[in-house]
Amino acid sequence: MFAGLGFFSARGVKGVAMRYLVLLLLAPLAGCAYTNYLTNADAHGGTVNLVSEFNHDAALQKANDHCHQYNMVARVTLDDQASNSMSFVCQPP
């Protein structure tokens, strides 16, 4: 009855199993593509890393986006080109 369907043949089941195995093995690597630019970030402030990957205004925008969740704005406290980072504090607008 199912002989004509590739999924139910021996090769079809093996092929489907291999696809799931490959997806299962590659799924954890998907997280590697994401870079967390914010470190030590909380309601008081934090650090934007890898500032050279985007310009200073974009780094400040990332800081402001973070502070806005606390109804605050970001103020840069240290723009360290040597460590490629920018530290900021969150303060009331």
Image (spheres, rainbow, N blue to C red):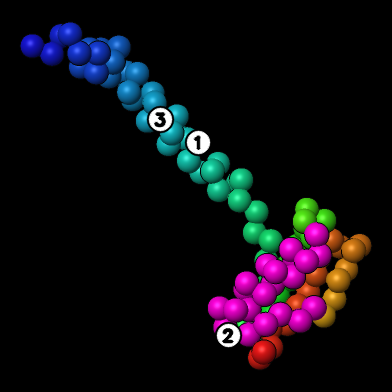
Which label sits in the foreground, 2 or 1?
A: 2
Classify mark 3: residues with Cα within 10 Å, few (<14), some (14-19) or many (20+): few
Q: In the figure, is residue 45 to the left or right of 50?
A: left
Name which residue type carries label 3. Leu
Residue indicated by mark 2:
71
Residue 42 visible to an observer of this rendering: no
Name which residue type carries label 2. Asn
Task: Please state the extent of the stretch shown in magenta in the rendering.
Answer: 55-76
In percent of width and height, residue 60 lies at 74, 70
Residue indicated by mark 3:
21
The tag on residue 44 is none
Residue at screen point 15% across, 9% down: 3
Residue at screen point 37% across, 30% down: 20
Q: In the figure, is residue 30 to the left or right of 15?
A: right
Query: Which of the marked residues, 3 or 1, is nearer the chain's N terminus?
Result: 3
Residue at screen point 17% across, 8% down: 4
